[in-house]
Image (tube, rainbow, N blue to C red):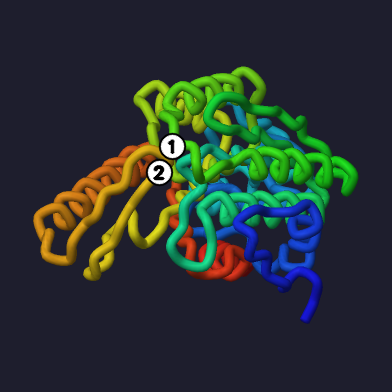
Amino acid sequence: MSKSIQENTSGYVSLNELHGMQFEASGFSFLPKYKVQSLLAGRHKSAMRGRGLDFKEVRQYVPGDDIRNIDWKVTARTQKTHTKVFSEERERPVLLVVDQSSSMFFGTQEYLKSTVCAHLAALGAWRTVDVGDRVGAFVFSDTQYQQIRPQRSTTAILQMLKTVEQYNLQLNAHQPPKSKTQILESVMQKVRTTVNHDYLIVIMSDLRGISDQTLHHIFNLKRHNDVIIFHIEDEWERQLPLRSVSLSNSEYQVSIESSMKKARSKQQTAFENEKEMLVNQFSEYGIPLLTFNTKERPSIQVRDLLKDH
């Protein structure tokens, strides 16, 4: 068994654990059906008007095209002016938005949501650097965040993962979850002022407390960048088990009996409605929302959702 497969059962992540994820950071990249640039797929080709490195296609001429690229053979055959389009290689920096807030410190299956998020951040970071692109991050808790500027060195990745570890270790099950509406708004506003264009922004969160203002920031980022949502959820958030369960925080405890069908149905409906609303809103702007659970190993899930074709 390799170092990367050894499980950590403490409920918290360690830098060594996240370092070891580099051995699992393969087999995933661009999934065409989502129509976003490859997640961590390395050098990316962009359409351009002019002379590039590789021929891409011939299309009908439009005003502003370089007349030096007119394809006279196709033009003569079709009696309509056509031009050659080339592609060039360009960098695609990746920015990871990593949620380590109190609502993430929850899980009823194999992992906590906070652990899944940390693993996904590590996998994304190692994959990005492996193909030669820069990767940066915003790591946040309920009340603060830290920015790591995009770099492409192993040293920089370890610094980023150390920050993820530090935020993860601050999580405390004895403290009730706080609203993270404000921190989400602050983080995404800062991302907007930091990112210019041609980034791939991966938001890893359960999206609890997301507001219209946060959505506004995300939609604006999509105008000049690619955005993808890694939505992390637990099975009990979607549907409570049929057996009686007790839910508690540091102050209160509530028991939900197996006979309380109305309460279960209400909780399930509320979750499904909120999820559907988010999926639809993101879809309108061409932003894919991929769901990750707390049962399967994150590296297996990311390879399944973003297979490397």
Relative to 225, residue 192 above or below: above
Residue 14: image location, x then y, percent: 74, 53
Q: Residue at coordinates 37% horizontally, 27% vertically from top-left?
A: 211
Q: Residues within 10 Å of mark 1 (few under 14, many from 20)?
A: some
Q: Residues within 10 Å of mark 2 (few under 14, many from 20)?
A: few
Tell me which corner region of the image, top left, top right, bottom left or bottom right, holds residue 63: top right
Whether residue 219 appears in this view of the structure is yes
Q: Amino acid at mark 2?
A: Asn
Residue 144: image location, x then y, percent: 61, 25
Kindly identify which residue carries mark 1.
176
Residue 225: image location, x then y, percent: 58, 34
Disc assigned to residue 249: 2
Relative to 211, residue 101 above or below: below
Whether residue 56 appears in this view of the structure is no
- The residue nearer to you, when weighing 181 against 174, is 174
Could you tell me which quadrant the C terminus lies in?
A: bottom right
Q: CB of mark 1 within 8 Å of CB of mark 2?
A: yes
Mark 1: which secondary structure?
A: loop
Q: Is residue 173 left or right of residue 55?
A: left
Q: Residue at coordinates 75% horizontally, 60% vertically from top-left?
A: 17
Q: Amino acid at mark 1?
A: Pro
Could you tell me which quadrant the N terminus lies in?
A: bottom right
Q: Residue at coordinates 75% horizontally, 32% vertically from top-left?
A: 148
How far is disc 1 from disc 2 in space, using C-alphas? 6 Å
Q: Is residue 149 left or right of residue 168?
A: right
